[in-house]
Amino acid sequence: MSKLSHLSKIGTIADALKYIKSNQTLLCGGFGLSGIPETYFAAIAKQPGIKNLTIVSNNGGLNHIGSDKLIEAGQVSRMIMSYMGRSKPLMNSYLSGKIEIELTPQGTISERCRAAASGIPAFYTKTGADTWIEQGKMPVKYNDKGEVIKYSQAKETRVFNGKKYLLEEALPGDVALVKCWKADALGNLVFRGTTLNFNQVFAQAAAVTLVEADEIVPVGSIEPNEVHVPGIHVTKVIQSTEPKHIESLQLARDHTKSDNDSDPRVVIARRVAKEFENGSYANLGIGLPTLAPNYIDPNVSVVFQSENGILGVGPYPTESQVDPDIVNAGKETVTLLPGASVFGSQDSFAMIRAGKINCTVLGAMEVSQYGDLANWGVPGNIKGMGGAMDLVSNPEETKVVVCTTHTTKDGKPKIVKQCSNPLTGSRVARVIITELAVFKVDNEGLILTELQPGATLEEVKSKTDAPFREQLSSSPKL
């Protein structure tokens, strides 16, 4: 029997760069700035002969970090991603027609790559049904005048068990760029915290996988049951040399619970907290929904999921607990509760689409009388849907709670007869909670079930641009 230790995939950055050429599709791991292959980004940006790259990633870089380096160097012609983030170089290049962007739901990206890794050419998913994704209305390319000159392709659909599904094709890469915690000479990989994200599935979905590791360890020091990606998928491993970055540093001291009942956000968060059932699993959107855990009854236990790969999200860290390898879906530093688990994006969105998450709480730009939700963009200002379309893809199993202020800052109703902004999902919202009222949604439309403290029926009527039935309880839900 031959000795495995005689094999070695360890190399230098120069060795690895030989595999990267112009016109390739690169699958770039990471989520936000967590777990990104920054050593590779820095090295490729210094190779001006490498051009016309297609980058597949969850999001763009930030402040000259990550894929920003390649965009600024003029090496990228196309990106497939779920969210543009705050990258000014990316946004400027997109709106001026220098880069095409194919915005794709986060879970669909991971599943397209899992299909590629499994030798499956295509699959059906409910994510994106009745949205611009299905209809082929996503703006892909602008001209230098800021006019859309290319849209996405409409999706083929098919009905299974009375529900509409979209056909999505596998997404293989020529090269995957992956960041891991530990690697050995055989290419066995171990990830830490939430850095599994897209790294794990991307590592398996490309013809060539180039890895950078925090630690390169001897063969045999990684236990077989600890391996996240087996070496068969890995081409080269180099030592990671670039520092880690944190996109959104959040500390516990900056997030103390507020009891200011005059603050609409507090009013909404208090009421949202009543929607969680004991022993349930829940997902919280970014922003306002993240306040709700502060007001959960101490006798109610809820396991919070973060779509970048956590079950058991804990509170924000103290300064000594800050860890760039542990972030939530908002790219914020968080902690993990005792008993928490971490996993890759492909597994996270599998549990979401399958309805394993009992409740998801999302913000809204608009929500219609029949529960249509629009919360990811407005015409002319499209940054991406992230994981929102996946989160509402199975409303029969996952209760979708929408929490939002009743009107926009300029007083326009957010609860409307029909959404004017692009949809996240059709007929998905089951409960709508604002600082004025609580509505339930059924097949016939809106039902006003509660008035928030201090609100009147007349005020709710005047600020709601949709008809509703009244089934008011004698007092708000406590």
Image: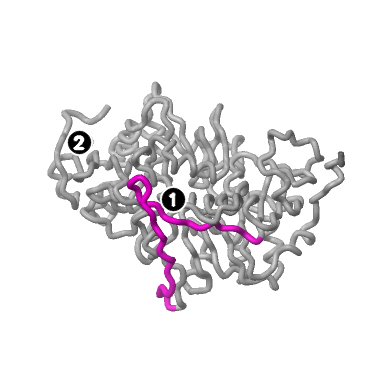
Marks 2 & 1, CB-CB < 8 Å contact: no
Does 5 sit above or below residue 277?
Answer: below
Instruction: State which tag comes first along the sequence, 2 or 1.
Output: 1
The CA span between labels 2 and 1 is: 34 Å
Does 52 sit above or below residue 424?
Answer: below
Residue named by callout 2? 449
**Residue depicted at x 43% and y 54%:** 385
Rendered image quadrant of residue 148: bottom left
Rendered image quadrant of residue 436: top left
Residue named by callout 1? 125
Residue 457 in percent (x, y) is at: 14, 41
Residue 333 visible in this rendered orientation of the protein: yes
Position of 210 with respect to 30 (left or right) is right
Badge 1 amino acid: Thr
Does 148 sit above or below residue 157?
Answer: below
**Residue depicted at x 75% and y 47%:** 187
Report the disc number at residue 51: none
Q: Which residues are magenta?
A: 145-174
Label 2 CA crowd tier, 10 Å (few <14, some 14–19, many 20+): some
Secondary element type, mark 1: strand
Residue 432 in percent (x, y) is at: 28, 42
**Residue depicted at x 54% and y 30%:** 337
